[in-house]
Image (cartoon, grey):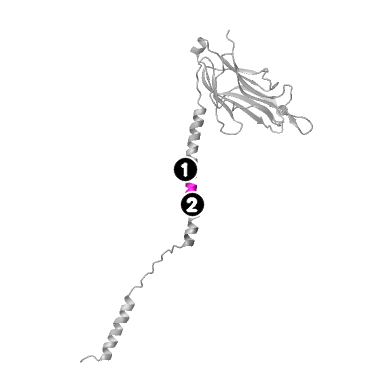
Amino acid sequence: MRPTPSDIEAILDIHQIENSATRTPKTRKLRFRWNLMTLLVLMPVVATWTQYFRLRHENERLQREIQVMESQSRELVVVQKDRLAVVNLPPSWADEQKWVMELPSEDSVANGGTTYQLCLATREINLSGTRPSAKKYTLPPGRHQIELKTRRERGNGKQSSWNIIALVDDQPVIEINESADWNPGFGGYGSGGDRFDRSYQPKNTSQSVLLFHEQFSVDQSNGQFKVPEEPSNGLLLWVQPIPQS
């Protein structure tokens, strides 16, 4: 029995329905469209990040160079072995005062070198450079680290006091205790521990070396603070030769 034309059309319609059901839909690819506005927005962003990375690289290079320069400038150099050499250490925090000092060896002292003593005074300080009475400590030969510490001690229900310590190789060698009114807290004038940012040696074996010098200001009763002309309280740390007998 032959199929009629209507049967053939029905069969073709069924095949078309099956093909449309099994056909997977094509995914549409999203493409970013570049235009003038996009370029205008991206250009300053790229320029900013490029400048940031360039400056960061330059800062790292400068920091490395500064560290090398500081290490070289803080290097202790001994030219004359019959006298001391000193350089101050960079502070790790505010008000830290430290020095590295090379003193003549025993052999150098036996051949005419100098023995030194560390001196600390807290009263009768002036700006003329005269040396008041002080507590002293004989420094041993060789290389040592010297530090000056000033601490305010606050007692339980008691009046506070001051503790001034000179240390050699982290060991206290001179200690002075002062009352609360020793430092009125109005600042002062003098030369701090940054005097020897490069290695220094005195001109001769009889010359003293001043490490730290500060004379405290006092209240002038008119709202003004001034360093008095006469000797007053302060801090004085120096190294002086011991006369050979």
The residue segment tinted magenta is 50-57
Mark 2 crowdedness (10 Å alpha carbons): few <14, some 14-19, many ≥20:
few
Ranked by sequence position, the earlier of labels 2 and 1 is 2
Residue found at the far top of this picture: 245
**Quarter of the image where one finds residue 33:** bottom left
- The quadrant the N terminus occupies is bottom left
Q: Vertically, is 217 above or below 58?
A: above
User: What residue is at 49 percent from the left and 48 percent from the top?
Assistant: 51
Q: Vertically, is 191 above or below 66?
A: above
User: What residue is at 64 percent from the left and 30 percent from the top?
Assistant: 151
Residue found at the far front of this picture: 36
User: What residue is at 32 percent from the left and 81 percent from the top?
Assistant: 17
What residue does disc 2 label? 47
Identify the secondary structure beneath mark 1. Answer: helix
Quote the CA–CA distance across marks 2 and 1.
16 Å
- The quadrant the C terminus occupies is top right
Give the residue type that dot 1 points to.
His
Residue found at the far right of this picture: 222
- Taking depth in this image into account, of 52 and 104 the one nearest to the observer is 52
Q: Is residue 193 left or right of residue 38?
A: right
What residue does disc 1 label? 57
**Residue 225 location (% of width, % of height):** 74, 31
**Residue 84 location (% of width, % of height):** 54, 18
**Residue 210 location (% of width, % of height):** 61, 21
User: What residue is at 28 percent from the left and 84 percent from the top?
Assistant: 12
**Residue 56 location (% of width, % of height):** 49, 44
Q: Closer to the observer: label 2 or label 1?
A: 2
